[in-house]
Amino acid sequence: MSADATARPTAPEAGLDALTVGRRVRHLRTARGMTLEELAAAVGRAPSQVSVLENGKREPKLSVLQAVAAALGCTLADLLVEAPPTRRDALEITLERYQRGAVFAGLGLPEVRLGRGLPTDVLELVVGLQEEVLRLHAERSATPEEARRANAELRAQMRERDNHEPALEERAAELLRAVGHTGGPLSQGRAAGLATLLGFSLHYVGDLPPTTRSVTDLEHGRIYLPAARSGAAGSSGDARAVLLQALGSIVLEHGEPRSYAQLLRQRVESNYLSAALLLPQDSAVAFLRRAKADRELSVEDLRDAFAVPYETAAHRFTNLATVHLDLPVHFMKVDRAGRILKAYENDGVRFPTDALGAVEGQPVCRHWTVRTVFDIADQLSPYHQYTDTAAGTFWCTARTQPGSGGAGEGLDHSVALGVPYAHVKWFRGRDTTERAASSCPDPACCRRAVPDVATRWEGRSWASPRTPASLLASTPVGSFGGVDTPAVYDFLESHAPKG
């Protein structure tokens, strides 16, 4: 057996593109002036079997490809080149893939028969029309409703796993060991060391496209980050998170998302990996177990111990609390208008949902901790409250955070972490006397004005609403994440190394 034959012994079984292999076989056979029958006889197969191979209708076996390579006087590597042999072959492969897809099948149209009698310009036209059909299909399906449905499904999956991802925890531990991190907070230098380890250099710039947090140049091994975050006071946790999220997508080999479900899953994975690097599981769990033993669990202490923003600490707590501390929890992020921005629960609390089961954008009861915290005079200290609900009594700790012009449209927002009453004994702040009751979704709870006040002002007032920017915004075509792709390409072109 030749060296070429042993170089990639499992390539066909590993999912090599049968269409491309078949076209290369046909191209090399015709280039050598062999007929289908002659090649079939040379490899001891029926002509129909070779035809199936050339048409890419069957996954090629290694033994068959070795025989074909010998008959054609080429190496196995020549047959395994990933690129189609000609432009015409590339068009035919593209059309074949389209016609085998679910979108084409749903149209109920007859397939275009490929052959030498089909002019190349007609083939170009058909492929172009197919691409436009796929584009319109993606545009139609990329709706806010689809996003909410996908997010509701993802939240259910996270609940089933207790918001814990062992594979990502292990990957984070491997990366930390590789840069010599032995515990405690991850420094900016160690975070930058991860980039170097993965073959990337960091470049802080002031002209990132507005729709991006970072841009990665895979060709030149560069990661572009916002200059304002590189050394801004108090922003080190966020600066590290932006870098680690970019590295997370590289480590996890994320590709261009093709659906909202894929986009959201990628975001969850990269954010999770980033948090697992900032608050390593072993160190964070040891810290939390000590605090639980002392009945002093506190999001503020976790935040300070690992030098991360409050929201990062609260969300990371949900990753570890159930699996390692036997604590069911819920997490909420709400803007000052009372709309849910993010939420997670596995403790039985009932979030408001829409008809699709989504919670994002839904109004929260005015009596819940995550809302009442906005009215507390002391915004520097953590706020704790018990809330009686139809699903039981929950204790929550909450803090307000300044707006950033992002998901909350620049409004301040609050972050709350809560547990059922039976588990509050482990937390600092359990002795609070603050208590409220909520009967939502009953409109009488907080969505109906006091009768006398309503009578006084009904028909005598008018308020100009602050419409959410996302209410009427269309989904960017070709980008589920809302990234302005042309702007990103222009940015990369202007910053790429010259020469």
Image (tube, helix red, strand yellow):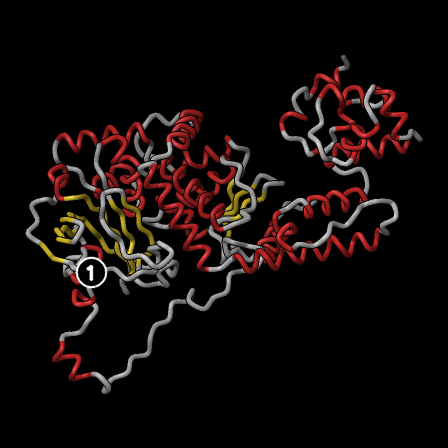
* Residue 169: quadrant of the picture: top left
Q: Position of residue 70 (x, y in %)?
A: 83, 19
Q: Residue furthest bottom?
A: 460
Q: Residue furthest top?
A: 1
Query: Which one is nearer the viewer's eye here, 238 or 255?
Result: 255
Q: Is residue 70 left or right of residue 262?
A: right
Q: Position of residue 176 (x, y in %)?
A: 40, 28
Q: Amino acid at mark 1?
A: Cys
Q: Position of residue 64 (x, y in %)?
A: 76, 21
Q: Is residue 83 left or right of residue 396?
A: right
Query: Which residue is identified by label 1?
Result: 440
Q: Position of residue 398 (x, y in %)?
A: 20, 51
User: How many other residues sit within 10 Å of disc 1, few (<14), some (14-19) or many (≥20)?
Assistant: many
Q: Regarding mark 1 in the picture, which secondary structure is present there? A: loop
Name the residue: 53% across, 43% down.
Answer: 223
Q: Is residue 32 above or below residue 264?
A: above
Question: Which part of the image, by quadrant, shows the N terminus?
Answer: top right
Name the residue: 22% across, 55% down.
Answer: 370
* Residue 89: quadrant of the picture: top right
Name the residue: 27% across, 51% down.
Answer: 332
Q: Is residue 136 left or right of residue 391?
A: right
